[in-house]
Image: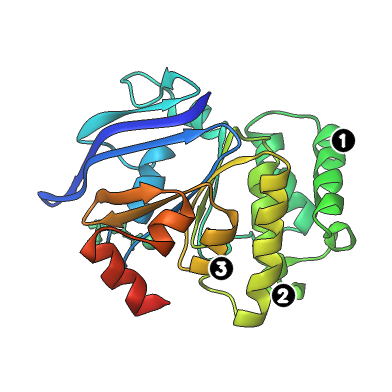
């Protein structure tokens, strides 16, 4: 079963195509890694999937339902998709627990007791239980980013989108975030992640997509795309960053 199906996506900024005839399919429980040079369209693709950008052409299906169709309520769709960005965007004036329960309580109208119980359970499972009542500035960057991921999980999303979630972290803090993503994969969560961490992509992804100029130039299992790329541009990109 496919959780996400993107067909013929086109997105332009100022008349320039940033996504061009882009197809992407993500099966349930799969992890897809998007790689490619800066400006190749990774973030735009993730933002389109979360309906943060309007498409110029193409369709996006979530669990077989066309979410790019006119008349679809983007807020309702976003409740089924979690998204985490490069810079952890926790609310500094809220405790970890309140950061995690804000959306479930406001958007999903869950009772506080129920939302907090679920949040504490998630934080415990992710090794952050002791930080529930702390404020973000008392946490390391890695812990903050892990809380941001827990917050995205609080709505029990069908799909988690991660946009270079380790890029803003000091190198010694990257590992704990990657370990968390690995654990989420083991739990069966379906994910699409943009990353510069090639060894992580090789390790965790079922499928790697190399984006170039808004197109998927090469896609397949990591051993193939990262190990034996067939396209010169993929080879060039990999030789520069590995
Ligand atoms: P990546 O995440 O792979 O680095 P992006 O999706 O951020 O790439 O950007 C793809 C292209 O789209 C870039 O050329 C970027 O300058 C352009 N772009 C992204 N967002 C906007 C925007 N809001 N307005 C204009 N151009 C944009
Ligand atoms: Mg980006």
Give the tally of numbered discs: 3
Left or right, 147 with respect to 199, comes to right
117 shown above or below 129? above
Measured as percent of width and height from the top left, residue 197 is found at: 51, 68
| Picture disc at residue 104 | none
Please name the residue shown 44% across and 18% down the image: 65
Q: Nearer the viewer, mark 2 or mark 1?
A: 2
Please name the residue shown 51% across and 58% down the image: 85
**Residue pointed to by mark 3:** 166
Can residue 46 be seen? yes
Quadrant housing residue 204? bottom right
- Foreground residue among 223 and 165: 223
Can you tell me whether the CB of the residue at mark 2 lies under 8 Å from the nearest atom of ligand 2? no
Please name the residue shown 86% across and 44% down the image: 121
Q: Nearer the viewer, mark 2 or mark 3?
A: 3
Label 2 and label 1: CA atoms lie apart by: 28 Å
Can you tell me whether the CB of the residue at mark 1 lies under 8 Å from the nearest atom of ligand 2? no
Label 3 and label 1: CA atoms lie apart by: 32 Å
**Residue pointed to by mark 2:** 140
Dot placed on the residue nearer the N-terminal end, 2 or 1: 1
**Residue pointed to by mark 1:** 113
Callout 1: SS: helix
Q: Residue furthest left?
A: 15
Where ligand 2 lies, by quadrant? bottom left
Proximity of marks 3 and 1: CB atoms separated by less than 8 Å: no
Please name the residue shown 27% across and 72% down the image: 236
- Foreground residue among 9 and 112: 9
């Amino acid at each position: 079963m496919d959780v996400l199906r993107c067909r013929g996506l086109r997105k332009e900024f100022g008349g320039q195509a940033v996504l061009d005839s882009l197809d992407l399919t993500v099966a349930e429980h799969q992890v897809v890694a998007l790689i490619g040079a800066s400006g190749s369209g990774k973030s735009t693709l993730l933002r389109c999937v979360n309906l943060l950008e309007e498409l110029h052409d193409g369709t996006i299906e979530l669990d077989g339902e066309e979410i790019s169709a006119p008349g679809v309520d983007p807020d309702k769709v976003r409740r089924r998709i979690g998204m985490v960005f490069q810079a952890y965007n926790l609310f500094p004036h809220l405790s970890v627990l309140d950061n995690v329960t804000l959306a479930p309580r406001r958007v999903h109208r869950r009772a506080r007791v129920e939302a907090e119980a679920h949040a504490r359970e998630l934080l415990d499972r992710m090794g952050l239980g002791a930080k529930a009542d702390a404020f973000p500035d008392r946490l390391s960057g890695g812990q903050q980013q892990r809380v941001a991921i827990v917050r995205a999980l609080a709505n029990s999303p069908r799909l988690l989108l991660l946009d270079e979630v380790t890029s803003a972290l000091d190198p010694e803090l990257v590992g704990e975030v990657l370990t968390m993503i690995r654990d989420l994969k083991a739990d069966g969560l379906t994910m699409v992640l943009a990353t510069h961490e090639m060894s992580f992509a090789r390790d965790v992804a079922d499928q790697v997509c190399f984006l170039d100029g808004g197109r998927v130039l090469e896609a397949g299992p990591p051993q193939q795309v990262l190990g034996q790329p067939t396209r010169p541009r993929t080879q060039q990109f990999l030789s520069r960053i590995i």
